Amino acid sequence: MTNPTETAQWAELTSASTNVPSIRSLLEAPRSELRVTGPGLVADFSRQRLTVSTRDLLLELVASTHVCHQRDAMFAGEAINSTENRSVLHTALRRPVADPLVVNGTNVSADVHQVLGRLSSFSTSIRNGEWTGVTGKSINRVINIGIGGSDLGPAMAYTALKNYADPNISFAFVSNVDPEDMVSALATSDPERTLFIIVSKTFTTTETMMNARLARQWALDSLNVQDPREVVERHFVAVSTNAAEVDAFGIASQNVFGFWDWVGGRYSMESAVGLSTMIAIGPEAFHELLAGSFAMDQHFLTEPPATNIPILMGAMSVWNRDFLGISTTAVLPYAQVLARFPAYLQQLTMESNGKRVRKDGSLVNYNTGAIYWGEPGTNGQHSFYQLLHQGTEIVACDIIVVSRGHTNQTEQHETLVANALAQASVLSVGVTREELAKSSTPVELISHKEMPGDRPVTVLMLETLNPFSLGALIALYEHSVFVQGAIWGINSFDQWGVELGKKVAVGIQSAFEDRNLTADFDSSTRESIKEYLQQRDGD
């Protein structure tokens, strides 16, 4: 496995990073070669702080670290998730039935489309009122219970595509083990007309199952039905691979939708995990979402590196992280319906590439995954943009623009887009002391108003936000994350870092029950447990 720091390109990029022209100077000439059109969107990298020759060096680094070979291995179904010996085949979820994928003699596509067919039939029965609750009333409320990838993807997609959703069905997404989350969702639900989707691959996830049991008890208490199994059968479905646990919960086998161990949670929203999305927008629109992702998959597979948006985006992210020392990226969607997109990307990017060990088990000697965060514009402009423009920490920014909105408020939408493009300009170009002086700014305020610019900005422009373009946008970020991980030589598809905290939490909860403070906790945790028990019990 190639250590990127041992390549000639890494050394050349390190040298190039010591004398990078300002973005302002780079923009003195058109940079059309850094604007690339792809499925559903146009990616404008012209405001990144790099020259075309630096871009070419990055593409040479992509070649020397065998990114395309690793990409092809992923699409072919090889077990590139080395620590779990698993294939990584979320791309198979959107592969057309006419283009089947066979891995080790198994027709993966046939399995995928069999599940898609069941999802479509079930979704249609909810949407047309054929499926009813135990009292014979149609469903008008769907509550998705999951956490992590079982929540973030469906919640994001529902919000993003609400203009395509059935207005007669409301949706809630419950993830937090804090009972306030579930109680709040139940408070506005009619038990006779509510469907619960329990999403957990193992059906043992603590947070999800506690919420599921709370929902089941609420339904049983609210619906005066002699046989409680009828309530669960008509009001609960599961997305899981653990048939025994699902059966023990009481959900009928015909109401269970499976998926596969080659789908990681943060990549699963286009599997059965997206059942709530399909119910909301309908099977036809859901297949358009899949088509958008598939189109970006094909772009990633076939487009030359210089015009391959995921490769460029991933390589420039490595440039910003390792050579310009930029540790965070703000995702700034100028579309209110993409409000949950930054949260979705937080898991996708940081759970994938927040690694300090290479695939061979050796510690990295370079930086890996950046911190991703963000809020919709223009809200953020009145919140944290001050730091973006004039803070001591340089933050890279992805600005997402939708050219045509779903309302007829043209003037207001143009104000939104004007703000997006203005921020892209000011973040990258800034304003100098000389320009401020010429604008009659009082001398004593010039230093306060100067903006240095040089904040790298990528602008992603979508003609409209529809299921196809959302699918393309999702796949773009998935593949950008892959490219980064492939360059760094890390496994982007495991998440061992989330395990230990769960195990320790079980021990702490046992201490709550038996008040045993002699367990193997650190001194501060023992004191915190003691303080909690005193406050809980009023001692």
Image (cartoon, helix red, strand yellow):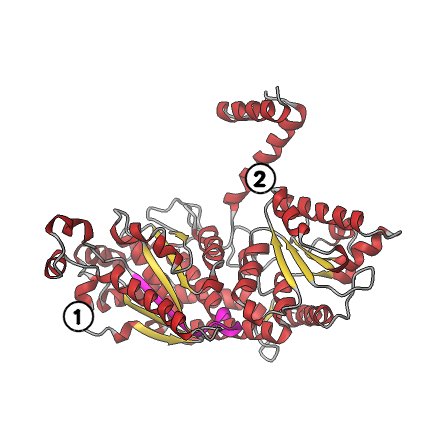
**Looking at numbered disc 1 in the image, what kind of residue is underneath it?**
Glu
Placement of 14 over or under 417, stated as above or below: above
What residue do we see at 26% from left, 48% from top? 391
Which residue: 12% across, 59% down?
440
Secondary structure of the residue carrying numbered label 1: loop
Between 286 and 162, the one nearer to me in the picture? 162
Question: Quarter of the image containing the C terminus?
Answer: top right
Q: Is residue 521 above or below residue 503?
A: above
Out of 295 and 373, give the one closest to the viewer: 373
Query: Is 481 drawn above or below residue 115 in the view shown?
Result: above
Q: Nearer the viewer, residue 143 or 240?
A: 143
Residue 234 location (% of width, % of height): 79, 59
x and y, in percent, of residue 169 in the image = 66, 65
- Per the image, the residue denoted by label 2 is 502
Q: Is residue 473 above or below residue 379?
A: below
- Local packing at callout 1 (Cα closer than 10 Å; few below 14, some 14-19, many 20+) is few
Mark 2 vs 1: CB contact within 8 A: no
Where does the image place residue 44, in percent across and percent down from the top left? 32, 70
In the picture as drawn, the residue positioned furthest to the bottom comes out as 98
The part of the image, by quadrant, that contains residue 307 is bottom left
Residue 64 can be seen in this image: no
Q: Nearer the viewer, residue 360 or 309?
A: 309
Q: What amino acid is labelled 2 in the image? A: Lys
Q: Which residues are magenta?
A: 457-471
Position of 139 compared to 333: left or right?
right
Question: Is 392 a magenta residue?
Answer: no
Give the labeled residue for mark 1. 28
What SS does tag 2 mark?
helix
Measure the C-alpha gap from mark 2 to mark 1: 53 Å
